[in-house]
Amino acid sequence: MVGDAWFQLPLEVLVDRYRAVMDRANKDLEINMGRAYRAAAVNQTILFGSSKRCTPNNVQSSACYPVPESPLSSKLYGKYTDAPSLEVGQGDYDTYRQRFLNSGFIVGPVRDLRPLFRRAQRKASDQIRLSQTSDDGSSTINKLHVGSDQAIFSAILGEQEFQREAMRRKYGERPRPQSRIVNVRIEDILDPSFPHEVLQPKGDKSGEFGIVVDYWSDLEMQTADNGEDGRWLLHNQPVQEQLLAFPASPGAASRRSPTTSPRSSSTARASRGPPSPSPPSSAPRTAGTRSRSTPTCAWARSPWW
């Protein structure tokens, strides 16, 4: 997806952040899976970009309903968090938290990516002749949106999360708390009460690919549904003043004051998130400079992040 990239962090920054994110993700997974974590020897190594909505699939699809809740704060956007935000002049999903997979960004060891890509290729080949009308809630069909790599990888993630929950139950853990996708309540991901694409719980690692979603956008930040989560900064002007000039967000009352991060002069950090190491002071900026008089821009997260 190189053609879709606007800026890319320096290699050493990407690698350091990848390691930090994976370390935190595996510690969190151990807590969430309990005894099943060590018994099944689960290890996460593949990082995908994050998305605010499960697209192009529908909630009835196994690509969507098994996905766990976002670990981001439930007050991220104040009272508008995870609610349609049209009333505040934004897009439908602008005030939802990052939760789902975005296939525009993938990073991980080659040895672990190969099995994932082979699985994706088999899944695409099996479904290549099926139409886009895929997620109609029927338990007798298993379709994917033809031509969409994101639909395929999302389905693989959904299967992984479904089998993880099956493993948790196998080793005596309590069912995962209820969740909601838009206006659909999911009481039990192993047996949702609404018409859905059925998966069979196996209680083993057959669907495990070690996939993690970059919830905090430490390595990437997708622009879809994120139009109000960042602004362009000019590097020939004081960065701090520009951050303080951000317009008030829906959750302004509950957010902290914006601060610049030592990781990048153009990044406003989330109030919570996995620890990420700082890049060397000599690391290049996200946008090059042509001359002192030429404004150069970089993307910065809005203060409520």
Image: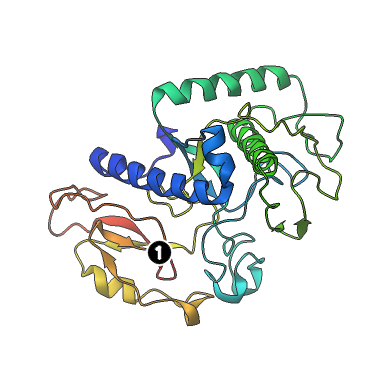
Question: Relative to residue 140, is residue 261 depicted above or below?
Answer: below
Can you see residue 103? no
Which amino acid is tagged 1?
Ala
Helix, strand or loop status at disc 1: loop
Q: Position of residue 210 (x, y in %)?
A: 51, 34
Can you see residue 294? yes
Question: Relative to residue 249, is residue 30 depicted above or below?
Answer: above
Q: Position of residue 277 (x, y in %)?
A: 26, 52
Q: Position of residue 44 (x, y in %)?
A: 47, 37
Left or right: where 8 falls relative to 106: left
Q: Residue at x 72, y 58 (%)?
A: 178
Left or right: where 244 falls relative to 73: left
Question: Relative to residue 302, is residue 158 depicted above or below?
Answer: above
Residue closest to the eye, 97 or 7: 97
Q: Position of residue 108 (x, y in %)?
A: 41, 32
- Residue most extreme to the bottom: 253
Report which quarter residue 168 is drawn in. Answer: top right
Number of marks present in the image shown: 1
Left or right: where 173 falls relative to 61: left
Disc 1: which residue:
270
> Which quadrant is the N terminus positioned in?
top left
Q: Residue at x 60, y 68 (%)?
A: 81
Left or right: where 138 falls relative to 291: right
